[in-house]
Image (spheres, helix red, strand yellow):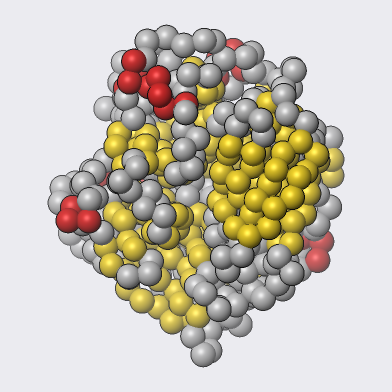
Amino acid sequence: MRLALLLALTTGPAAAQVSFTDRSAALGDHQYAGGWEHFVGGGVAVMDCNDDARPDIFAAGGTTPAALWINRGDFRFDPAPLPDLSETTGAYPIDIDGDGLLDLYVMRVGPDVALQGGPDCSFTDATADWGIPQTDQWTTAFTAWWEPDSDRPVMAVGHYVDRSNPDGPFFACDTNTILRPAATGYAAEILEPGFCPLSMLAATDARGRMTLRLSNDRQYYVRGGYEQMWDIADRRFLTEADGWGKVSLWGMGIASADVTGDGRDDVMLTSMGDQLLQLAQPDGTYAPAPYGIGTYAQRPYQGDDGRPSTGWHSEFGDVDNDGRLDLFIAKGNVDQMPTNAMADPNNLLMQRTDGTFQEVAPAAGLADPHRARGAALADFDGDGRLDLVVVNRRAPMLLYRNETPATGHWLGLSLTQPDGNTQAVGARVTVTTPDLTQTREVRIGGGHAGGQALPLHIGLGPATAADVTVTWPDGTTTTQTLQADTVTRLSND
């Protein structure tokens, strides 16, 4: 097991050379802008909205209009029309109406908007038609899941500071909302206390239960708040009596994946200062990773600024397809916060064979110093290598093509099923090769202010085939052997 060496870490074997080329000109000069209400947010949603097997891009704009680009192949992107959307903080792709076409839940400073997806990446405002209650709140987090026998999702919406509170912004965190399918439209349930979440993720926790995790920004709850875990089935917050020790940090983003290869998903929490990796334990709890693992990334790696870093979006992905998950962290000062580093370049941490991580962003061509926010790892050109898109605050977006030589083999797995949950959200996938067993889960949420609806990407290393077992949301399982270097659609008809 990869974790076996973590308690005796010093230096590990070097990661393979990783190389990205800047293709940002393909997206033009789109920026995430605005005043203090857009210090946070700046998410990007990546999805295939016209079913041509090429990922398309939606980006929040803050006080500038949101933007949509259609992927035409070979890193050519055409701007596409959208309804007039301003004050956006981010968006998540999700099939809300179960028609097999991807919709967008767009988060805003003010009432959110649900965009119904149509053919060829057309989107129309369906918020009222779907009966989704909206309020004049400041939305900064989103996640969703499907209850058994429901054809529509439950959606959790996280709200930041209550702008109407005259005593704010400190100690003025707003309440959060659970939107449940009702006889007509959706019914809103208040989820409190709220501690200013900047990320929410519904996923299987270390106990093997579906849990809603909220990562909260201590900047505004100041004291008395903490990271939250809400048991979805029991509909209650977990406490220290359940084995969940309180963690208080400047929470910005969540990434969750089975980093150690033990079948349990570990959790990365970005923050101002340490980026906290929590390793899932056999008893169903979490423990901080050893410092020497190399993921804390608490200061800029160029060494010319000793102030703490500010981490935003984090995402696990196998950048070199060696069968080990790597980690990207978007970094950037809130705006002009003097206590934290100003030039704070993004991290690309490659996992080595002993389970430790090595910083490669400067050599890989990713050491950009602007104020990054949302991001996504996605194969934009279909060559089996994960590329990268990054949204910056008050600076143009970045788009990078992964040109790492001699990468391993890979699989792309697109899961579909009928009856509402068309993307099979909640399914767990086990991929087995002679050297590795890897697990993935289909989810909506996490990151910072944006996410993906794309085929699962699994690096296979030298293996040219893999056994793939899918545990579908209804508990049934299917197993088949798939050849490497292809995207395969798996269906639970």
- Percent across and percent down for residue 403 are 74, 22
Give the left or right position of residue 335, taking residue 349 as reference: left
Q: Which quadrant of the figure contains the C terminus?
A: bottom right
Query: In which quarter of the view is residue 93 placed?
Result: bottom right
215 in relation to 387, above or below? below
Give the left or right position of residue 419, taking residue 448 as reference: right
Query: In which quarter of the view is residue 120 placed?
Result: bottom right
Which residue is rendered at x = 67% and y = 34% of the image? 433
Q: Name the residue furthest front.
A: 434
366 in relation to 224, above or below? above
Which residue is rendered at x = 75% and y = 18% of the image? 406
Give the left or right position of residue 401, taking residue 324 as reference: right
- Percent across and percent down for residue 171 are 19, 55
Q: Nearer the viewer, residue 67 or 5?
A: 5
- Percent across and percent down for residue 175 are 30, 66
Q: Nearer the viewer, residue 314 or 196?
A: 314
Which residue is rendered at x = 58% and y = 69% of the image? 474
Can the viewer see residue 124 in this picture?
no
Q: Nearer the viewer, residue 147 or 51?
A: 147
Q: Name the residue furthest bottom.
A: 183
